[in-house]
Image (spheres, coloured by chain):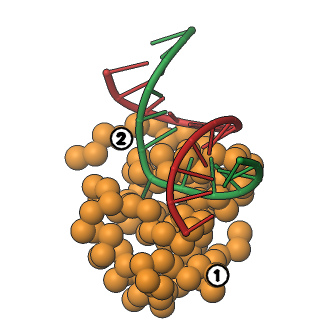
Chain colours: A orange, B green, C red
Amino acid sequence: MISERKPTIFEQKVYDLVRAIPSGKVCTYGDIATALGIRSSQAIGQALKRNPFAPEVPCHRVISSSGKIGGFYGESTGPRIDQKIAMLREEGICLQNGCIDFTRFRHSF
DNA sequence: GTTGTGACGGGTC
DNA sequence: CGACCCGCCACAA
């Protein structure tokens, strides 16, 4: 059981944006942060990491601006990352040497 | 109330 | 391209 805390307006906005990402598309922390009007992508990671909407919010569609997967879904930077990559592939997203070619899959808010 | 840290980004060196 | 610093939000101790 995950510790549920009261999601702040900020988090709710993050979840809403991430949830709005269509299948086969991805987005970066910076995009979300900018979309929310802030400059802190860390807060995005916090919100996603704390995300009480696990499968509801496709955190795996949120990646670093570097194209790296970062580390979401479950514990943290672990074997689940591979599962996420496989899932992204299923959605039509290709991995370039461990990096997502978000240049072709970047979602526009 | 203060401090430190975190799934980060961007700019600068 | 790698390393360092700053910024920014939320949460735990």
- Residue A37 image offset from top left, x and y in percent: 74, 49
Which mark identifies residue A4?
A: 2
Q: Residue A103's mark?
A: 1
**Residue A80 falls in which quadrant of the image?**
bottom left
Q: What chain is tagged by disc 2?
A: A
Return the residue nearer the eye: A100 or C3: C3
Q: Position of residue A58 (x, y in %)?
A: 45, 68
N-terminal of the two: label 2 or label 1?
Answer: 2
Place residue C13 in its image quadrant: top left
Which chain hosts label 1? Answer: A
- Specify the amino acid type for callout 1: Thr
Residue at (72, 55) in percent of width and height: A34
The spot of residue A49 in percent (x, y) is: 41, 51
| SS class, disc 2 | loop
Q: Secondary structure at mark 1?
A: helix
| Mark 1 crowd level (few <14, some 14–19, many ≥20, 10 Å Cα) | few
The residue located at (70%, 74%) in the rendering is A108
Residue C8 sits above or below residue A24 on the image: above
Choose between A104 and B11: the one closer to the eye: B11
Q: CA distance from mark 2 to mark 1?
A: 35 Å
* Nearer the camera: disc 2 or disc 1: 1
Residue A59 placed where, x, y %? 45, 64
- Asked whether the beta carbons under mark 2 and mark 1 sit within 8 Å of each other, the answer is no
Q: Is residue A62 above or below residue A14?
A: below
